[in-house]
């Protein structure tokens, strides 16, 4: 078992207990102080943070919802790791599903009377993501931008299929948020996609989204090669 280093956890301030524990553990995981494959002990974390195990359990649930840990009944909580084969499978599915979602969304927008309002809202989110300091805030805005066309497609089956990929996608979005250069690239790629969406350029939007997903996939491979 890989060594788990939770020495960076600090005593709690006035934030909600579960949120403070979640943010502290998340930073340690993303910065590699708690490496993939490490087992997190609920009691140990609670003692380190001078609290009960209840907020620790909630923090673990939040981390699991972002694909950063895996909760195994009767076994415990393990920092998540994904193989290159799993990353490839998710990329292949995502490439098909998200470009279809984008197509469907553009078709819907062609008939939408408040199209300008929707576009302005997403473009504001892209602009706000540029000044977002917190990892979680950037990941949230990133996911919200993708949800514009995933949920906007109006296809419930497609939405359910995308939700099955969420653990890997959110894990990798958190990793990308750690890298200043990749963050800047993501913002530029989102802008390129929405320039095409704004003028209902279906082919241009598909091409820009495909490049964005390919760049994300290559970044994921690079990070995993560095960890090996």
Image (tube, rainbow, N blue to C red):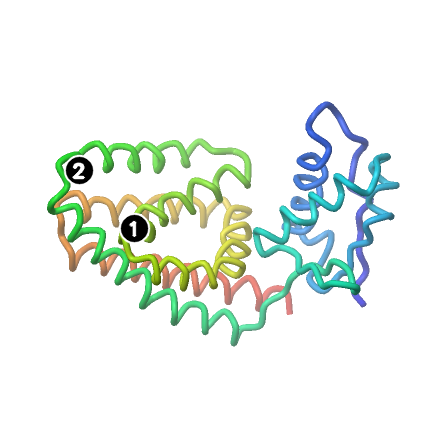
Residue appearing at x 70%, y 37% in the figure: 18
Q: Position of residue 107 (x, y in %)?
A: 15, 53
Q: Quadrant of residue 123?
A: top left
Residue appearing at x 68%, y 54% in the figure: 32
Point out the tag, 1 or 2, that comes first from the N-terminus: 2
Q: Quadrant of residue 52?
A: top right
Residue appearing at x 44%, y 65% in the figure: 218
Measured along the vertical axis of the image, is residue 50 above or below residue 108?
above
Measured along the vertical axis of the image, is residue 206 above or below residue 82?
above
Q: Foreground: 179 or 175?
A: 175
Residue at the extreme front: 156
Alpha-carbon neighbours of circle 1 within 10 Å: few (<14), some, or many (≥20)? some
Measured along the vertical axis of the image, is residue 98 above or below residue 200?
below
Q: Position of residue 164 (x, y in %)?
A: 47, 63
Secondary structure found at label 1: helix
Report the disc number at residue 115: 2
Q: Foreground: 6 or 39?
A: 39
Residue of label 1: 149
Alpha-carbon neighbours of circle 2 within 10 Å: few (<14), some, or many (≥20)? few
Residue appearing at x 32%, y 32% in the figure: 124
């Amino acid at each position: 078992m890989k060594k788990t280093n939770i020495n960076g956890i600090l005593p709690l301030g006035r934030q909600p207990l579960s949120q403070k524990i979640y943010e502290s553990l998340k930073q340690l995981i993303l910065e590699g102080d708690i490496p993939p494959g490490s087992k997190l002990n609920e009691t140990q974390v609670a003692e380190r943070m001078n609290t009960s195990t209840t907020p620790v359990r909630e923090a673990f649930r939040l981390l699991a919802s972002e694909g950063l840990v895996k909760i195994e009944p009767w076994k415990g909580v393990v920092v998540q790791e994904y193989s290159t084969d799993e990353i490839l499978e998710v990329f292949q599915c995502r490439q098909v599903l998200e470009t279809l979602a984008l197509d469907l969304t553009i078709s819907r927008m062609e008939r939408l009377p408040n199209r300008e309002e929707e576009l302005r809202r997403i473009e504001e989110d892209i602009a706000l993501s540029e000044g977002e300091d917190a990892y979680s805030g950037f990941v949230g805005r990133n996911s919200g931008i993708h949800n514009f066309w995933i949920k906007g497609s109006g296809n419930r089956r497609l939405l359910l299929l995308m939700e099955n990929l969420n653990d890997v996608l959110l894990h990798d979005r958190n990793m990308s948020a750690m890298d200043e250069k990749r963050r800047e690239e993501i913002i530029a790629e989102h802008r390129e996609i929405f320039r095409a969406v704004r003028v209902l350029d279906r082919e241009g939007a598909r091409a820009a989204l495909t490049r964005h997903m390919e760049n994300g996939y290559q970044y994921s491979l690079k990070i995993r090669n560095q960890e090996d």
